Amino acid sequence: MNDCIFCKIIAGEMPCHKIYEDDFVLAFLDIANDIYGHTLVIPKKHYVSVKTCDSTTLARVIDACKKVGNHYLECGFDGYNILNATGEAAQQSVFHLHFHILPRKKGDGENAFPTLSGCKEDLSDVCKALKFEEEKKQTICDENCVVLYTDGACSGNPGAGGWAAISSYKGQERVLSGGEEMTTNNRMELMAVINGLESVEEDVPVKVFSDSAYVVNAFLQNWIGSWKKNNWRTAGGSEVLNKELWQRLLKAMETRDVEFNKVKGHSDNEYNNRCDALAREEIAKLN
């Protein structure tokens, strides 16, 4: 997100007073400096709020909050608040998911909790109005074909990389993932599709969903046809990058009817987010 101040901090375009960092999370002092040690903990991927963040990433952010908070206890504090605002109505001011950590000492005189107006409704009525109905789990089941979500990721590009694929057929889900110590993002995107397709029985239709324009447009815009016609050369005459992976992908497609679909990355698509999280976990295993 070009206009997000937190994304600029993550990219190194703006300075910050860094407290903690790992592959997925960054924690730094709040520029407001309104209480000693006021810290912001954010995911390195842009999510607007808790509402749009996938569960795996959210768990990493919360774990980082715990790690930083407990570190502050070792620094001599007696406790800490963890606060979050989700949405404009909740006074969220920066629309990149973040948690506030406020280190606390006994008798410090700070009050992190607002004075509220009070609710006049009976709690049983409130519970009836707000209680969860039986949750219907989102599925990607299509009785007529295999639905395959894929994603790849790379740290450094080139660098350590990971890929993941989640397929579903007649209610049965299969999850695959893997990684390589030195690779590129595009190679990981291809490996995700290749491994996903190779795991599907032959002669079964497959709908592939990927956020990689590199992979999807090769088929939707028929780049692949031009490459094959030109003996795996681009229009400029250079050899097509990752030729061996494209050829392996085409081999997997020979006995499967494959349809490619582009999805928006890093949005609210549960399965795209799951694949992304799994791919990044593979990267973490290599570091």
Image (spheres, helix red, strand yellow):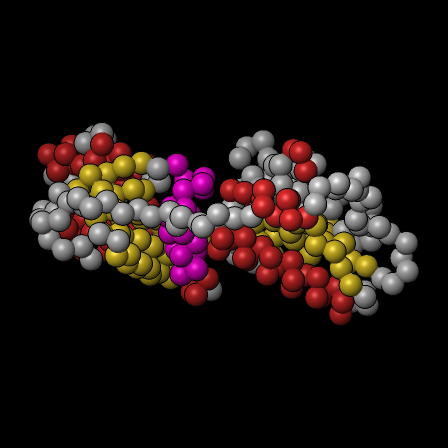
Q: Residue furthest bottom?
A: 74
Foreground pick, 165 / 114: 114
- Residue 247 seen by the camera: no
Above or below, comparing residue 257 to residue 236 in the picture: below
Foreground pick, 95 / 222: 95
Q: How many marks?
A: 0
Q: Point out residue 249 in the picture as x, y percentages from the top left corner.
A: 18, 48
Q: Point out residue 178 in the picture as x, y percentages from the top left corner.
A: 33, 61
Query: Residue at position x 81%, y 66% from top?
Result: 78
In the image, the segment drawn in magenta is: 264-283
Query: Residue at position x 64%, y 49% from top?
Result: 124
By secondary structure, the bulk of the magenta-drawn segment is best described as helix
Foreground pick, 86 / 141: 141
Q: Quadrant of residue 34?
A: top right
- Residue 49 seen by the camera: yes
Foreground pick, 114 / 134: 134
Whether 266 is among the magenta residues is yes
Above or below, comparing residue 268 to residue 37 in the picture: above
Q: Is residue 104 left or right of residue 217?
A: right
Q: Point out residue 67 in the picture as x, y percentages from the top left corner.
A: 65, 64
Query: Residue at position x 15%, y 32% from top?
Result: 226
Query: Residue at position x 51%, y 42% from top?
Result: 52
Q: Quadrant of residue 125?
A: top right
Q: Point out residue 237 in the picture as x, y percentages from the top left corner.
A: 20, 34
Q: Is residue 281 left or right of residue 163?
A: right
Whether 146 is among the magenta residues is no
